[in-house]
Image (spheres, rainbow, N blue to C red):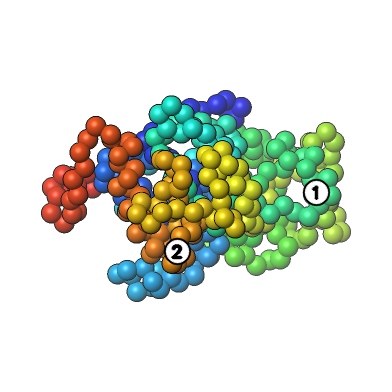
Amino acid sequence: MHGMTKHHTTDALVIGAGPVGLFAVFELGLLDIKTHLVDILDRPGGQCAELYPDKPIYDIPALPVVSGQELTDRLMEQIKPFDPVFHLSQMATTVEKTNDGWRTITDAGTVIESKVVIVAAGGGSFTPKKPPIKGIEEFEGTSVFYAVRNRAAFKGKRLVVAGGGDSALDWALDLFAEADELTLLHRRDEFRAAPHSVEKMRALVADGKMKLQIGNLKGLKGTNGHLSALVLTDHDVPCDTLLAFYGLTMKPGPLADICAGAGVEMQAGLIPVDTEKFETTAPGFFAIGDINTYPGKLKLILSGFHEGALMAQKAFQYVHPDRKWRFEYTTSSTGLQKKLGVR
C-alpha cells in the first residue's frame, strides 16, 4: 500500500495539526471550506499533546485551566461537524504552485491539491530522535521504524517497541495481536505514559501475551537492512522489526524547503506574514501560530486562534471566488448553527 501514490483534492490544506491548525479547520469550516491536515506526529495535538499532554495551560479563554490533551480533545470535538481529513505520521516535503492553487507532496507519497495552503507548524517540524547507534541508517525503512505508517509491516513479526511514553505504550497495545511476538523495551521499569495504558501492558505481560524487557539498546545485529537481534547491555534480544519512540526533536529543514518551493523567504526560521490576513508574499499561502512573524507577534495559542479567524476570511476569496461573503455570528445565524449540528 505504501508505495502507491494517494491523490486528494480539497479546498484547504493545513500543515500542522496542533491547536492552532485544528482551530483553523473550524474557522474555515464556518465558511464552507473543506480541509485536509498533514502532521508528522501519529495523532493530532502537536507539541501540546505530544510533549506536554498533562501540563496545565492557563490562558485559553473560558477555560481557567486545561491540559494539552484535553484542549486537543475539545478542539477535535469542535471540528467534527466539518469532517476534516488527517494525514498523520507524514511530513509535507514539497509545496508547489499549480494553475489553480497548490500541490503538496508528503514523504509518504501522498499528493494533495488545494486552493490554499496554511502552515500551522508551531516551531517547525518535529522529527523522531534516533537511538544513537552506529549504522542504524542501514536498517531504517526496512526493519527499523520511528512511526507506524503501515500496520501490515508489523504483521507476523518479532517486534520490539522501544520507549516509555504514550506513543510506545499505545502502539505496543495496538500491535501485540498482529505481531508474532511483541517485546516492549525501556531503559527502566517506570513509564511516562497514561497510567491505564501501563496497567493494561502489565496485565498482558503477566498473561504472557507481551514481553517487557528492561535495558539499554546498545547495537543492532543483521544484514542488508534486515534485523536479527537487538544488542542490550548484557544480552541480545531476537528481533526482526524495531519500532523506536525516543521522543522528538525540532527540524526546521523541511519547512525551509516548503517555503522556498512556494517562493517565500523565511526570516530566522520563521515565516513573515501581514497582519490583515496572515498571508505570506505568495498569494494563497498563509502561516498562522508560532511559525509566523510580524511586528508585535506573541507566541500564544490564543494569538494563533485569532490569526486563523482572519486567515479564513481571505482563504474564502480563493476557494469561493464566485460567492459573496457575508459575516455572520454563530449565535444568530441559523445557517451556521445547522452546519455545526446544533439545530
Give the image location of residue 117, x and y in percent: 44, 41
Label 1 sits on residue = 230
Q: Is residue 35 left or right of residue 142?
A: left
Q: Nearer the viewer, residue 283 or 343?
A: 283
Q: How many marks on residues?
A: 2
Q: Residues within 10 Å of mark 1 (few under 14, many from 20)?
A: many
Q: Nearer the viewer, residue 333 or 80?
A: 333
Closer to the N terminus: mark 1 or mark 2? 1
Image quadrant where one finds the N terminus: top right
Please report the residue visible at 55 percent of the width from the left and 48 percent of the height from the top.
Answer: 265
Please report the residue visible at 22 percent of the width from the left and 35 percent of the height from the top.
Answer: 323
Q: Nearer the viewer, residue 224 or 174?
A: 224
Give the image location of residue 46, x and y in percent: 50, 55
Nearer mark to the viewer, of 1 and 2: 2
Considering the numbered disc 1 on the image, is that residue within a helix, a strand or a loop?
A: strand
Q: Is residue 222 left or right of residue 88?
A: right
Q: Nearer the viewer, residue 82 or 226?
A: 82
Label 2 sits on residue = 295
Which image quadrant is residue 284 in? top left
Q: Is residue 40 shown to the viewer in this render?
A: no
Amino acid bearing label 2 = Pro
Q: How far apart are the two marked residues, 1 and 2, measured between alpha carbons?
A: 51 Å
Tell me the number on the disc at residue 35: none
Give the image location of residue 125, x and y in percent: 58, 51
Q: Is residue 275 above or below residue 181?
A: below
Q: Is residue 323 shown to the viewer in this render?
A: yes
Q: Residues within 10 Å of mark 2 (few under 14, many from 20)?
A: few
Amino acid bearing label 1 = Leu
Please report the residue visible at 34 percent of the width from the left and 43 percent of the height from the top.
Answer: 315
Please report the residue visible at 57 percent of the width from the left and 55 percent of the height from the top.
Answer: 267
